[in-house]
């Protein structure tokens, strides 16, 4: 049983290596899953922020068209832009977890209110024109310029917000890629080390068993031919050692029998 225990110890070592590698791989897979969730969240935030920005652009274009005697098209774009901004703003409120980002969104909403007020001022100016055409044209240009400044301020904040979400998405993707590569490397290392240990253990076990067996086989062959002077030079505490001791006792028994045979066959005086 001692040989089996030695073989089992090698097997246990392999299992231990695979267990450690498996634990590390599972840990990395959990990291990848978490990062993938974060990537999905960051991507959604980026899309909402981008659509928010596009909505602001639609309001600006629609307001300009409204002021240029294209009220129907302008009104449609303004409504679409406002709806897009409101919807994506709410989406961002629902998905954002970071306090700093939530606070930044609040500031964006404040600037959005100023931009929408400027848009409404242009629409009101068009719907209620001044009787003085020159004054009306001047005031309308001032309102459009004011709207442009407000929308630019809103786009600047939205652009900064979008850039941050893109950076966070890129960072999450990089983390996921690194975790995936680390998992692959760990798995390959575990397989390579396990195969190496398996080869070493198998070779050592085979050599430890076959070498003494070959020696005992040679001794047995010579003893069977009457060469009882052979010595068994095997020292082991396992079953091979027990077998070697049995061979030694057997050879000693043959020697005793041979001595007794010679004594009996010797001429008596």
Image (tube, rainbow, N blue to C red):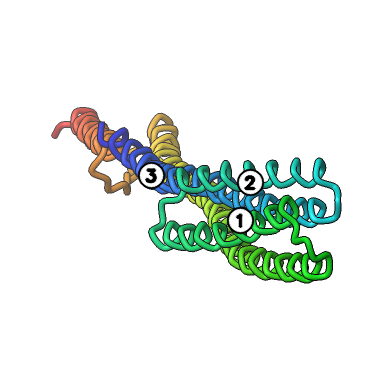
Answer with mark 2 or mark 1, whichever residue precedes in sequence.
Answer: 2
Q: In this view, does 197 lie above or below 263?
A: below
Q: What element carries label 2?
A: helix
Is 261 on the left or on the right of 205, as rendered?
left
Q: Which one is closest to the eye, mark 3 or mark 1?
A: 1
Near-viewer residue (250 or 145): 145
How crowded is the residue under tag 3: few (<14 C-alpha within 10 Å), some, or many (20+)? few
x, y percent for residue 9: 31, 41
In percent of the image, x 46 and y 47: which residue is there?
93
Identify the mark at residue 11; answer none if there is no mark: none
Quarter of the C terminus within the rendering: top left
Q: Is residue 182 above or below residue 167?
A: above
Dot 1 corresponds to which residue? 116
Res 237 seen here = yes
Between the residue at mark 3 and the residue at mark 1, the CA separation in whole angstroms equals 55 Å
Q: Do the residues labelled 2 and 1 touch (CB within 8 Å)?
A: yes
Answer with mark 3 or mark 2, whichever residue precedes in sequence.
Answer: 3
Q: What element carries label 1?
A: helix
Dot 2 corresponds to which residue? 82
Q: Which residue lies most toward the front here?
A: 131
In percent of the image, x 74 and y 65: which residue is there?
144
Between the residue at mark 3 and the residue at mark 2, the CA separation in whole angstroms equals 51 Å
Dot 3 corresponds to which residue? 23
Answer with mark 3 or mark 1, whichever residue precedes in sequence.
Answer: 3
Q: Is mark 3 on a helix, strand or loop?
A: helix
Q: In this view, does 53 lie above or below 82?
A: below
Near-viewer residue (51 or 71): 71
x, y percent for residue 154: 61, 64
């Amino acid at each position: 049983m001692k040989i089996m225990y030695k073989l089992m110890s090698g097997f246990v070592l392999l299992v231990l290596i695979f267990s450690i590698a498996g634990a590390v791989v599972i840990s990395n897979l959990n990291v990848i899953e978490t990062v993938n969730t974060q990537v999905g969240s960051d991507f959604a935030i980026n899309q909402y922020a981008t659509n928010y920005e596009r909505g602001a652009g639609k309001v600006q274009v629609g307001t300009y068209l409204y002021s240029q005697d294209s009220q129907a098209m302008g009104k449609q774009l303004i409504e679409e832009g406002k709806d897009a901004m409101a919807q994506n703003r709410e989406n961002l409120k629902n998905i954002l977890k970071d306090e700093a980002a939530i606070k930044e969104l609040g500031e964006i909403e404040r600037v959005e209110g100023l931009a929408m007020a400027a848009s409404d001022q242009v629409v009101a100016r068009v719907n209620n024109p001044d009787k003085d055409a020159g004054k009306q044209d001047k005031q309308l240009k001032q309102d459009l310029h004011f709207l442009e400044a407000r929308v630019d301020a809103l786009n600047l904040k939205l652009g900064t917000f979008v850039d941050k979400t893109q950076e966070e998405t890129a960072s999450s993707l990089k983390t996921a890629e690194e975790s995936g590569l680390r998992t692959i490397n760990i798995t390959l290392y575990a397989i390579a080390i396990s195969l190496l240990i398996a080869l070493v253990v198998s070779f050592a076990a085979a050599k430890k068993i076959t070498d003494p067996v070959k020696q005992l086989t040679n001794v047995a062959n010579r003893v069977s031919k009457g060469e009882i002077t052979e010595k068994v030079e095997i020292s082991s505490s396992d079953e091979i050692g027990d077998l070697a001791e049995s061979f030694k006792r057997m050879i000693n028994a043959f020697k005793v029998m041979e001595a007794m045979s010679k004594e009996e066959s010797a001429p008596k005086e």
